[in-house]
Image (cartoon, helix red, strand yellow):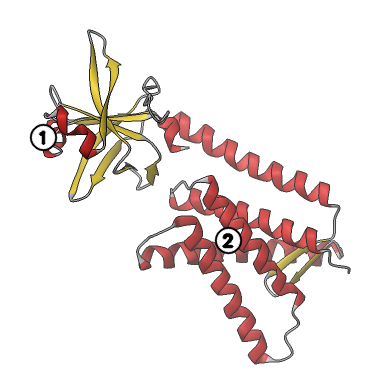
C-alpha cells in the first residue's frame, strides 16, 4: 500500500477532531475552536509515527511512549489548565476512545479482507480518495455536533446552573438562569453580557463610585427592564464560568454586567454562550 502524506495527515487530524469532540461530550466540557485546531495539528503530526518501522522491543516501547506523549499533549491542548487528576482521567478516556476506534477498524479489516485500511504504530491510514475521506469525516463531525446541540437545547430550560465571577481575590458563585432573551451586548467590545445581580459583588468591587470605573476597567452601558431603563457597569476583566448540575464546566468569552440585587442574587446568561 502506498501512503500519501496528505491523506495520512488530514485523516488523522480529523480523526483527532472527532475523538476530542466525543471526549468533550463524555466529560461535559466545551472547548473553543482554537483548541480544536491545535488538537488537530498535534494529532496529524503524531500520525507520522506510521512511517517509522521499529526493529526491536526497545524501539517499539519508544514508539508507544511517543504516542502516549502525543495523546497527553492533545488533551492538554484541548482542555488547558486542569488538575493532574482531571488530566489523567481525560487522557485515560481519550486512550479508551482510541482503543475502541482501533478495535472497530481491526474488525472491519479482518472481516472484509480489505486493503483500504492500514493500522501501524497507533496511526490509521485509509487508502481512499481524499475527497471521500473529507466528506465522511465532515458528515460524522456534523452529526455529532447536531446531536449535541439538539440535546442541549431540549434540556437547557430544565437544567440548573451556577455562574462564577472571579476577578483577583474576589470570587462569587450565584444561581444562574439560562435565558435566550438575554441578548444584551457590550456596545464597546461587541461581546455578549452575562448579568450578575448581586449587591455583595457590586459592593466588593466598589461600583458605587462611578469615578473609579476608568481605573478598575468598568464602563457603563444602557439596559432596560420591563418597567424602566438604567445604566449597568460592565467589564471585560475577570473570568465567568458556568457550572451545570451534571458537573459540566464552561468558561465563557463574554463581558460581565454587575448590578445591585433587588431580591435574591442570581446571574442571567444566554445559553447559546455554552456552545
- What residue is disc 1 on? 203
Residue tagged by mark 2? Answer: 97
Seen in the picture, residue 161 relative to 102 is either above or below; the reply is above
Count the marks: how many?
Answer: 2
Vertical order, 252 against 153 (above or below): below
Location of the N terminus (image quadrant) = bottom right
**Rendered image quadrant of residue 85:** bottom left
Residue nearest the observer in this picture, 264 or 76: 76
Place of residue 89 in the rendered image (x, y in percent of width and height, measured from the top left): 43, 64
Q: Which mark is residue 184?
A: none
Residues at marks 2 and 1, CA–CA distance in whole angstroms = 48 Å
Task: Look at the numbered disc 1 and give the secondary structure of its residue.
Answer: helix
> Residue at left 77%, top 64%?
125
Q: Residue at the location (67% across, 62% down)?
A: 44
In this rendered view, identify the residue nearer to me: 236 or 271: 236
Disc 2, SS: helix
Say few, some or many: other residues with alpha carbon within 10 Å of mark 2 (under 14 / 14 to 19 / 20 or more).
Answer: some
Which of 114/192 is in front? 192
Residue 48 drawn at (x, y percent): 71, 70
Of callouts 2 and 1, which one flags the residue occurring earlier in the amino acid sequence?
2
Answer above or below: position of 72 versus 160.
below
Where's residue 58, x and y in %?
64, 91
Q: Are the residues at dot 2 and dot 1 in contact (C-beta closer than 8 Å)? A: no
Q: Residue furthest top?
A: 227
Tell me the quarter of the picture where residue 66 sits: bottom right
Q: Is residue 23 left or right of residue 181?
A: right
Amino acid at each position: 500500500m502506498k501512503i500519501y502524506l496528505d491523506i495520512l495527515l488530514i485523516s488523522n487530524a480529523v480523526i483527532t477532531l472527532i475523538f476530542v469532540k466525543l471526549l468533550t461530550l463524555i466529560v461535559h466540557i466545551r472547548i473553543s475552536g482554537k483548541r480544536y485546531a491545535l488538537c488537530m495539528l498535534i494529532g496529524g503530526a503524531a500520525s507520522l509515527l506510521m512511517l517509522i518501522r521499529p526493529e526491536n522491543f526497545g524501539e517499539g516501547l519508544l514508539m508507544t511512549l511517543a504516542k502516549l506523549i502525543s495523546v497527553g499533549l492533545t488533551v492538554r491542548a484541548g482542555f488547558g489548565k486542569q488538575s493532574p487528576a482531571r488530566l489523567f482521567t481525560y487522557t485515560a478516556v481519550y486512550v479508551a476512545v482510541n482503543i475502541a476506534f482501533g478495535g472497530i477498524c481491526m474488525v472491519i479489516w479482518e472481516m472484509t479482507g480489505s486493503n483500504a485500511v492500514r493500522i501501524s504504530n497507533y496511526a490509521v491510514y485509509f487508502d481512499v480518495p481524499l475527497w471521500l475521506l473529507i466528506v465522511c469525516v465532515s458528515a460524522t463531525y456534523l452529526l455529532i455536533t447536531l446531536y449535541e446541540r439538539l440535546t442541549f437545547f431540549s434540556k437547557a430550560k430544565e437544567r440548573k446552573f451556577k455562574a462564577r465571577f472571579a476577578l483577583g481575590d474576589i470570587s462569587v458563585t450565584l444561581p444562574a438562569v439560562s435565558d435566550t432573551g438575554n441578548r444584551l451586548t457590550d456596545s464597546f467590545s461587541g461581546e455578549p453580557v452575562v448579568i450578575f445581580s448581586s449587591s455583595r459583588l457590586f459592593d466588593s468591587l466598589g461600583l458605587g463610585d462611578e469615578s473609579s470605573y476608568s481605573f478598575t476597567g468598568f464602563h457603563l452601558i444602557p439596559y432596560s427592564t420591563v418597567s424602566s431603563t438604567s445604566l449597568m457597569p460592565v467589564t471585560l476583566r475577570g473570568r465567568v464560568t458556568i457550572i451545570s448540575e451534571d458537573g459540566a464546566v464552561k468558561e465563557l468569552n463574554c463581558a460581565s454586567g454587575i448590578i445591585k440585587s433587588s431580591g435574591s442574587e442570581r446571574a442571567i446568561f444566554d445559553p447559546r454562550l455554552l456552545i
